[in-house]
Image: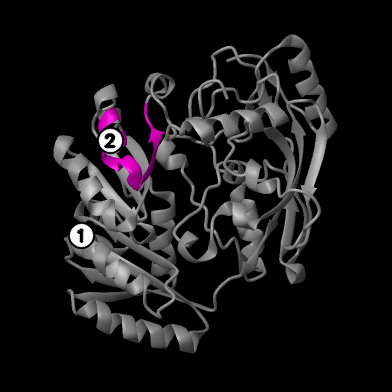
Amino acid sequence: MGEILKPASAEDVREAVLWALAAEAPLAFRAAGSKAGLGRPPGDESPILDLSALAGVEIYEPDELVLRAGPATPMDEIEGLLAQNGQQLAFEPGDLSRLLGAEARPTLGGVLACNQSGPRRIRAGAARDHFLGFQAVTGRGDIVRSGGRVMKNVTGYDLSKLLAGSYGTLAAMTEVTIKVLPAPEKLRTVLVQGLDDAAAITLLAEIAGGPHEASGLAHLPAAAAARSAVGYVAGAGTGVTAARIEGPEPSVLHRCAVLREVMGRHGAVEELHGSNSNRFWRELADVGELIGPDDSVVWRLSVTPGAAPAIAGALLAAGGGEAIYDWAGGLVWLALPGADDAAHDRVRGAVGGAGHATLIRAPAAVRGRVPVFQPQPEPLARLTQRIKQSFDPAGILNPGRMYEGV
């Protein structure tokens, strides 16, 4: 590990970037470090820009549905504050620290930088859709501000959309502003037991296309379901397919009654209320407790939902492993036993043109050798390079974290 720089303000971050420019030294970003194992690994001697001092909620206006905080503010603090006021982050980011073997807990800036979104994404959108604005330091050493504290902002470009999912390769965020929303009055989850993967995804597609307004649609094969801390799920002894319903109590009760009838045509039905329902979807967002074993290589596949069972099935048949389906099949978490290049090629080949695959958990040597993110077509790769050049012409900010040379 290289030298550690720990700025206490945006101006300190600017000075650190200017130093790195003058020294021609790459900077690797860190706040809590919960996602240090995500993406391509930094060089062993890269100086660390430790942003952990840039923490704390600066502005929270519940009536205006807006919150501004330092990027290193722990997600536990954010979510606790919102819960006290009957509000939530609608994009439902999970905690991947268990999956990645990290002791640190996630921060708001890390969630936004990775555009991390949980099961509710099918209705609420991704993290980037709730990212209102930021202050950041670019690779040029400039302090820039974009967006603001309102949901509509038409002045200039929406740069928040660029920073969300950029993994710190464009700028070092020093404050972020996000949209928050009221938490639902009532939450219930309808479960059906015993479906195989293909039948489950077909049912979830039917529910998604119906009038039920489900805010979560997932399927756990038997092995994953058995690891759940929710008794009705772990005790099923089979695969479990789940649909979450949220909103005003009369609406939730009515929609759940309809869903019990729809799902009951396919197997035994159960219903989760309150804490059990919350626990189930938190497990799914966090992933780490449900998927195993700990030494497996984990992929995140974003695919056409209808193609998900065939893609996952082909990969599991080739070498074993496990799969979990979220977003009605649009998101597949895949744990495979091999970390060799041939396994990587099989995953990319199986996904083909049906979506993209991201290598989430693997040894650093593997992540440094094979593409972690889906290789980009040449036109998109050139665009990515031009954006990087605009923000960070010397290429000193988290270089290579996503793509080699970016």
Residue 357 colored magenta? Answer: yes
Q: Is residue 368 above or below residue 386?
A: above
Dot 1 amino acid type:
Ala
In the figure, residue 258 lies in which quadrant?
Answer: bottom left
Query: Residue lying farthest right?
Result: 11
Q: Nearer the viewer, residue 222 or 376?
A: 376
Chain part drawn in magenta = 345-362
Tell me residue 354's x, y (percent).
33, 47
Name the quadrant containing residue 29: top right
Q: Please give left or right for residue 189 compared with residue 265 in the image.
A: right
* Residue 46 x/y as whole percent: 61, 15
Residue 198 got which mark?
Answer: 1
Residue 112: image x %, image y %?
Answer: 61, 46
Mark number, residue 349:
2
Sequence-wise, the earlier of marks 1 and 2 is: 1
Going by the image, does 165 lie left or right of 7?
Answer: left
Quarter of the figure with residue 12:
top right
- Please identify, in this view, whether the residue under mark 1 or under mark 2 is nearer the observer: 2
Q: CA distance from mark 1 to mark 2?
A: 20 Å
Looking at the picture, does residue 232 appear above or below residue 223? below
